[in-house]
């Protein structure tokens, strides 16, 4: 029996890695084993299999069009695009409107870097391994937002965690649930009126930063643990990591990515937003600009994340592809242990359109 179980597990892993050589049904069976899928009826199983088949077609298309990234069967492969957006992303918002929304209450970042300063930036930098009280980095572990549209809260807290550690404090996990439950801040977004944070129904980092400014800080994850759904606000007076304000690096125009690199080098990770549809099937490598533009619309942003560093990759023809390192909030069983790489310099998927950062006391 143990040998049979081992064979099944190996088949599952083989299927997910080299799925092209197996039938769609075999790949689906392996997927169910790996992700412990149990459907309520044979009808639901058949419906999920049909969605899975569509995902395989999409994955094949993406891999043909991408030169640097690998797409494959992820834990979201039996979800429709609509389910994926509803459970893991937010309502898409035009990037121009977000720029004005961010600038409603924050301050504009000083990005007046000289050519010499930009030229002297290192080719590679990763805040996961740089800085911090014990020189062990200033980025907390990968977390999982679950089926709650709270990516904005995770991006907010991740930026605050890093800023707090960069100030010489212990690397501390703060509470996303506090932001989900208690941050109801709004900012004007012409011409659509007010944009407000709405818990698992979405929100934006700068609104949350502004609330944290007014609160006087945040609570720790231990004090206010994550639930993955909306609960009544239970904010206490035990707050730490106070902010004096937040800053908008982007404005009506996307932030210059070389200047963004300089800001990150000097000030630590920053919150970003982008069009995340491609991430449903991301498996590794650098998301690049070589796929059709309709796969990733830089003008419609629906996911918030944390930009933690950059690097570059040399291919067999000695051509360098510069990239950003981005922290996601979908667990370590997605992507590159919870992270992904995306090409630097072309505002890919709109990553430079809505960039903000906390300003620590």
Image (tube, rainbow, N blue to C red):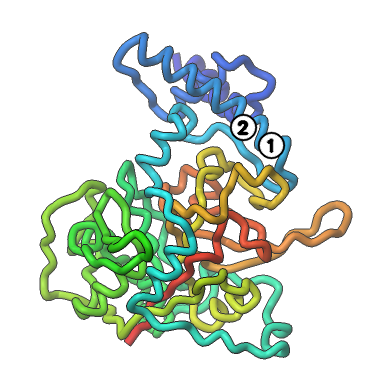
Residue depicted at x 51% and y 87%: 110
Asked whether the beta carbons under mark 2 and mark 1 sit within 8 Å of each other, the answer is yes
Residue farthest along the top direction in this orientation: 42
Residue 200 in the image: state x and y as whole percent. Answer: 27, 49
Q: Secondary structure at mark 2?
A: helix
**How far apart in space, not on screen, are marks 2 and 1 (Cα)?**
6 Å
Residue receiving disc 2? 59
260 w.r.t. 116: above or below: above
54 w.r.t. 261: above or below: above
* Quarter of the figure with residue 255: bottom right
Residue receiving disc 1? 63
Residue 18 in the image: state x and y as whole percent. Answer: 66, 28
Residue depicted at x 65% and y 37%: 62
Residue depicted at x 34% and y 49%: 145
23 w.r.t. 120: above or below: above
Residue 133 in the image: state x and y as whole percent. Answer: 42, 81
Neighbours of disc 2 within 10 Å: few (<14), some (14-19), many (20+)? many
337 w.r.t. 243: above or below: above
Residue 144 in the image: state x and y as whole percent. Answer: 37, 49
Q: Taking the image as drawn, is residue 136 in sight?
A: no
The quadrant in which the N terminus is found is top left
């Amino acid at each position: 029996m143990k040998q049979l179980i081992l064979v099944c597990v190996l088949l599952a892993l083989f299927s997910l890695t080299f799925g092209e050589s197996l039938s769609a049904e075999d790949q689906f069976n392996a997927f169910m084993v790996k992700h412990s899928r149990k459907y309520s009826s044979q009808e639901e199983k058949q419906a999920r299999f049909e969605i899975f088949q569509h995902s395989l077609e999409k994955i094949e298309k993406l891999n043909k069009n991408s030169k640097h990234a690998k797409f494959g069967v992820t834990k979201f492969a039996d979800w429709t695009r609509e389910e994926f957006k509803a459970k893991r992303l937010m309502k898409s918002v035009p990037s121009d409107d977000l720029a004005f929304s961010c600038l409603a209450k924050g301050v504009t970042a000083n990005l007046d870097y000289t050519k010499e300063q930009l030229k002297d930036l290192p080719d590679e930098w990763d805040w996961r391994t740089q800085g911090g009280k014990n020189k062990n980095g200033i980025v907390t572990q990968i977390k999982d937002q679950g089926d709650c549209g709270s990516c904005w809260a995770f991006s907010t807290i991740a930026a605050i965690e890093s800023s707090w550690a960069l100030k010489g404090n212990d690397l501390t996990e703060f509470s996303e649930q506090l932001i989900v439950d208690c941050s109801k801040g709004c900012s004007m977004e012409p011409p659509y009126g007010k944009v407000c944070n709405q818990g698992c129904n979405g929100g934006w980092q700068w609104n949350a930063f502004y609330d944290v400014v007014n609160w006087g800080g945040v609570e720790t994850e231990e004090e206010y643990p994550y639930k993955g759904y909306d609960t009544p606000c239970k904010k206490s007076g035990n707050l730490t990591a106070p902010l004096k304000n937040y800053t908008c690096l982007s404005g009506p125009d996307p932030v210059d990515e070389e200047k963004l690199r300089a800001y990150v080098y000097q000030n630590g990770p920053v919150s970003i937003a982008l069009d995340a549809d491609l991430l449903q099937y991301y498996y590794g490598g650098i998301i690049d600009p070589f796929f059709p533009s309709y796969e990733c619309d830089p003008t419609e942003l629906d996911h918030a994340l944390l930009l933690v560093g950059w690097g570059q990759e040399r291919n067999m023809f000695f051509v360098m592809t510069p990239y950003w390192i981005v922290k996601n909030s979908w667990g370590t069983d997605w992507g590159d242990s919870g992270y992904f790489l995306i090409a630097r310099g072309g505002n890919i998927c709109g990553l430079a359109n809505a960039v903000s950062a906390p300003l620590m006391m």
